[in-house]
Image (spheres, helix red, strand yellow):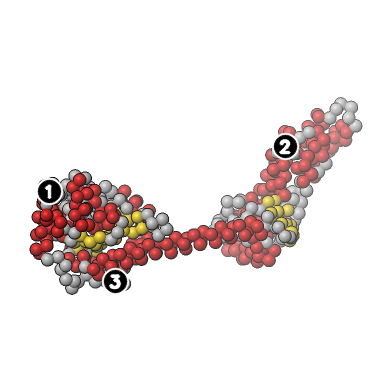
Amino acid sequence: MSASWHDSRDVQPATSRLLIERAHEELLAGNLDDQRLAQVRPLVRESWERSWRRRVGPETAPVLELATEELEAYRRTHPLASAMDMIRALLLPGDAEDTGVVIAVGDQAGRLLWIEGDRQLQSLTDGMGFVAGANWAEDAVGTTAPGTALALGQSVQIRGAEHYNRLVHPWSCSAAPVRDPETKRVLGVIDITGGPEVVSPQARLLVDATARAVESELLVARLRSRAETSARAHAVVSRTRATARATLHVLGRDRARLETESAHEESMIELSARHAAILLMLAVHRQGLSAERLCELVYGPEVSPDTLRPEMVRLRKVLERAAPDLVPESRPYRLPLPLDTDAHDVLSLLDRGAHRVALTAYRGPVLPESTSPGVEEFRESVRAGLREAMLSEASLDVLLAYADIPEGQADVEILRLALEMLPARSPKRAGLVARIERAE
């Protein structure tokens, strides 16, 4: 389907134009019973009467309601913005600036948003205020194809003198409303303005067909968007159902153990030291890490990210077989699901004041043999968090238990605090004193 605006016959004889002009004058004078008005098409006559009763001026220029910046912002968000390429292709084929017509696309309130087409014609229509941002609703400028099409909710053709506003008498136009394909609410209007050729039967069919094509395109785009959204939601739900929980065990272990639980099974794999460091850093930094930052945390600041990428490929292959829901995403690197660690469990228990349980759950330093900078930093933060909780909040028996693990055995401050808390005649005092003397 394409537009052809030339070689169309003039459908309005000169005598009819004169009759219409005289009928228009009688209407403006308030002579609504004049016989000449009966010769005007009912659609036009009724629109004239609506305009007259609303005191629309017959030579009033339309109001510019949207200035440049406001217009640009409004156009970007309007539902018809996505259909403009289709409208241009259907109504302005070939050299759009030499088509002999001007097309306008407006919103549901009658404000023109886009004006395109024949450049020379646009310079002439500008003089009557037919510009982007102007209000061409029926109650603003009277009878016009775009304004009356919106008022009636159907396609309309207005020929020359049928326009209520005298400034528009040199022009003819055909327009059709565009509706929301689902709610049927009017979204806007498509208008063709030019000479007599734009009010031919073929022109009306074309503008109607363009409006319907736009509605179909809007529906297709909307359904496609919903399908994509549904697919993403389904994928998230599927992943959530597939893996109910994943935990990385790193305390006191050189080779981390990854455990996953789903509704139907549990699995466990041991990871290499490098893979353990990568997964731990992604678990610690849940918001994600750039390739450069992850490489720095795993290998150190002097190593290129090119060293990290092949290791990520190998880790993905391991996880695809054992825990596909945990395969890291890229740019940034991050885990699609939360990954718990036994170290985080200890910190959480400490926060809740469950010091005895936390101490029991603490099985040793985080990946003790790892030299990855990020692992070393996290290892120290866990150790420091446990020690601080012991010094500030732990009961005597928990403090004594901490003094028996490697981290507390030679910690003079811990030992002295325990000694202060012991009763004066406790048989444990002598042992603590001896340990303090050895540590000092």
Q: Which residue is drawn at the image coordinates 85% and 33% (left, top)? A: 433
- Judge by depth and name the residue closer to the eye, 56 or 233: 56
> Which residue, given by chain and number where applicable, does mark 3 sit on?
2
Q: Distance between the residues labelled 3 and 1?
A: 44 Å
Question: Which percent across, then down, holds residue 253?
Answer: 76, 54
- Judge by depth and name the residue closer to the eye, 193 or 42: 42
> Which residue, given by chain and number where applicable, does mark 2 sit on?
353
Q: Distance between the residues labelled 2 and 3?
A: 76 Å
Q: How far apart are marks 1 and 2 (CA)?
A: 91 Å
Task: Please report contact status of discs 1 and 2: CB closer than 8 Å, yes or no.
Answer: no
User: In the picture, residue 242 is in which quadrant?
Assistant: bottom right
Quadrant for the C terminus in the image: top right
Helix, strand or loop at mark 3: loop
Say whether residue 1 is visible.
yes
Which of the numbered marks, if any, corresponds to residue 31? Answer: 1
Left or right of 200, for residue 220: right
Question: Which percent across, then down, holds residue 5?
Answer: 22, 70
Q: For the residue carrying disc 1, how many other residues have a C-alpha within 10 Å: few (<14), some (14-19), or many (20+)?
A: few
In front: mark 1 or mark 2?
1
| Amino acid carrying mark 3 in the image | Ser
In the rendered structure, which disc, 2 or 3, sits on the residue that comes first in sequence? Answer: 3
In the rendered structure, which disc, 3 or 1, sits on the residue that comes first in sequence? Answer: 3
| Amino acid carrying mark 2 in the image | Gly
